[in-house]
Image (cartoon, rainbow, N blue to C red):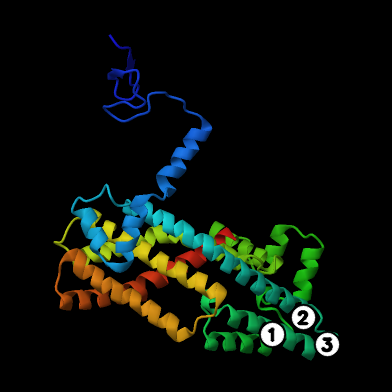
Amino acid sequence: MPDKDLCKNCEKTFDSSFDYCPYCGQEATDNLTIGVLFSNTIENYFSIDARFFRSFIPLMLKPGVLARRFVDGKRLQYLHPAQFYLFISVLFFFIFSFTVRKADKEVNKAIEKGFEAEISLDSVPSVADSLGIEQAREALKKNQKFTRFSDEEIERLDSIIVASPDQNPLSFGLSQEKLDSLIAAGAPLDEKLKAIGLKEDAGAFNKRLFTQLLKLYEQRAGGLLQTLYDTIPVAMFVLLPIFALLLKLFYWKRGSFAHHMVFSFYYFTFLFTTFCVLLLVNLVIDLPGALEFLILLSVVLYLMIALRNFYRSKWVGAFFKSGFISFLYMLFVVPLAAVGVITVAFFLY
């Protein structure tokens, strides 16, 4: 009689010559090490096998079809939507980090030179001030696609600085010399907070707010842009289910919330893939604004076709619903998310 092994997972016996349990599939030898633990985790979430390529091509060329197949039960041959989304989003933010790091360095350098120009105003007021403003303006304009400042907003910033060249906007109404003297003297935090206007009976929130503002001034806003963009990945995990909720509202009787989540995972995966391509191309050549606009417009067109294929609706319905969903999402959800990201980034700075 052949030797038998006992599976520790399902507790069924099987022939000892088997490498895996024929009932549950667990490996016969239980050699759990740190290497095995983390390699399995990485393989489960970031593995690229035939399923990736079977999923990627229909995702890009057949909008909504991949999500429809997954919901209909054809799942083993395709990459799981959450796994697909996680892989592409990690890839996107990895590429994005290089662009943000470059923009952050340039903006930090311009801000730092602006502070230095303020300090030397007594000796060469007109030249130092104009150089600092010009460098800040050029850095902001060069990185407009990341800072999202319009030309009008940059001009308003210029006018504010020019209107009060002897006072730094971050000096809280004090002369920069007085505030710098407190910092240089190593004054206690409470004394510096009091100097910039914090009342003694202020609550915890106001104290935290003033502390962050003081920190922003002391560090010359260094790394602020990087902190801002570090919070975006967390926000995406909130934006995705909100998008699924909008789908549920427009397609109330066309499936459960889980079905709408499947569609959202695949659609956001497509978005991140598109943004990855744009970032990589922009690293080589600077794409014209008109071409970038057309590419972003194609994202809405993709949504319309995807809605039609996934929900099996008519073209007219898909056209209007994709427009309404895009309009509501961009007009309300994204701005509120942006405010949330900025707020969180400020308090984490």
Is 111 situated above or below 35?
below
Q: Is residue 23 left or right of residue 238?
A: left
- Camera-side residue of 78 and 268: 78
Q: Amino acid at mark 2?
A: Ala
Residue located beneath label 3 in the image: 124
Q: How many marks?
A: 3
What residue does disc 2 label? 117
Q: Residue at x 40, y 43 (%)?
A: 44
Label 2: few (<14), some or many (≥20) within 10 Å?
many
Residue type pointed to by label 3? Val
Could you tell me which residue is drawn at 23 percent across and 63 percent down?
Answer: 65
- Check contact, mark 2 vs mark 1: CB within 8 A: yes
What percent of the width, then of the height, locates residue 299?
34, 74
- Taking the image as shown, residue 51 lies to the left or right of residue 137, namely left
- Marks 3 and 1, the one that precedes in the sequence: 3
Q: Are marks 3 and 1 in contact (CB under 8 Å)?
A: no
**Which of pointers 2 and 1 lies earlier in the amino acid sequence?**
2
Residue 256 vs 276, above or below: the answer is above
Q: Is residue 133 left or right of residue 53?
A: right
Residue 183 numbered tag:
none
Mark 1 — residue? 133
**Is residue 108 something that shows in the picture?**
yes
Q: Which residue type does callout 1 highlight?
A: Ile
Looking at the figure, which quarter contains the N terminus? top left
